[in-house]
Image (cartoon, rainbow, N blue to C red):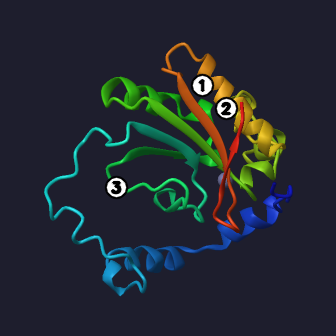
Amino acid sequence: MGNLRMLDLDKIALAGAALDNGALDSIEAAFAHPSAVPNKPDTSDLYESGPVPHPTRKKLAVVTCMDARIDPLAFAQLPLEVGDAHIIRNAGGRAADAVRSLIASQRLLGTRIIYVIHHTDCGMASFRDEELRRILGGGAMVETMAFLPFCNYQQAVIDDVQFLRDHPLIMSERVRGYIYDVVTGSLTEVKV
Ligand SMILES: [Zn+2]
């Protein structure tokens, strides 16, 4: 289930630092002209039949990773459309980082089902807290900061489902965990 692959953090940091303002300006300039982007999905008819209702249709909140390869509306075994679910994304799809949004999703907007969906080849399985603290230069602020990396894919899902089931502010009757395979596109439930 996804080999652990360590990122070369220093190389990535150097590549990021090497991007000059001109390069970033041209990336942002393209955002202003989305029609110029090939294969951009046409969403112009999305609101044709009226506004999408505010509370979710399927009473579902999905917690998943921010990974750019994931389209939560395209999970093959979880057919979702705009308006069906809240999609809460963060690095790793970690539950502890999603609590604030889940409380709002449940108490203010009526969701009752939570799916935690991690994925294979996740960047959060490629470093340890100490390494990111080193990149940030250390200091009191980062020493107490938990970046929530993990080293075991199955266990991370189990931990997050359990965390939500045990959380006193989360309505946790229906919390499930899955791992999404970024190569095959399949979702595998992790029984907790
Ligand atoms: Zn990830």
- Residue bearing the label numbered 2: 160
Left or right of 108? Residue 27 is: right
Left or right of 35? Residue 157 is: right
Quadrant hosting residue 106: top left
Look at the numbered discs 2 and 1 and tell me whether their residues touch, using CB distance below 8 Å: yes
Q: Give the Cα separation between the discs numbered 2 and 1.
A: 6 Å
The residue that appears at 54% across and 59% down in the rendered structure is 75
Mark earlier in primary sequence (3, 1): 3
Q: Nearer the viewer, residue 61 or 90?
A: 61
SS category of the residue bearing label 2: helix
Picture coordinates of residue 154 (x, y %)? Answer: 78, 41
Mark earlier in primary sequence (2, 3): 3
Q: Is residue 3 visible?
A: yes
Residue 17, which numbered label?
A: none
Q: In the image, what residue type sits under mark 1? A: Leu
- Residue bearing the label numbered 1: 164
Measured along the vertical axis of the image, is residue 72 above or below residue 98? below
Left or right of 162? Residue 134 is: right
Residue 82, which numbered label?
A: 3
Q: In the image, what residue type sits under mark 3? A: Val
Picture coordinates of residue 150 (x, y %)? Answer: 79, 41
The residue that appears at 42% across and 73% down in the rendered structure is 28
What crowding class fits label 1: few (fewer than 14 Cα within 10 Å), some (14-19), or many (20 or more)? many
Q: In the image, what residue type sits under mark 2? A: Asp
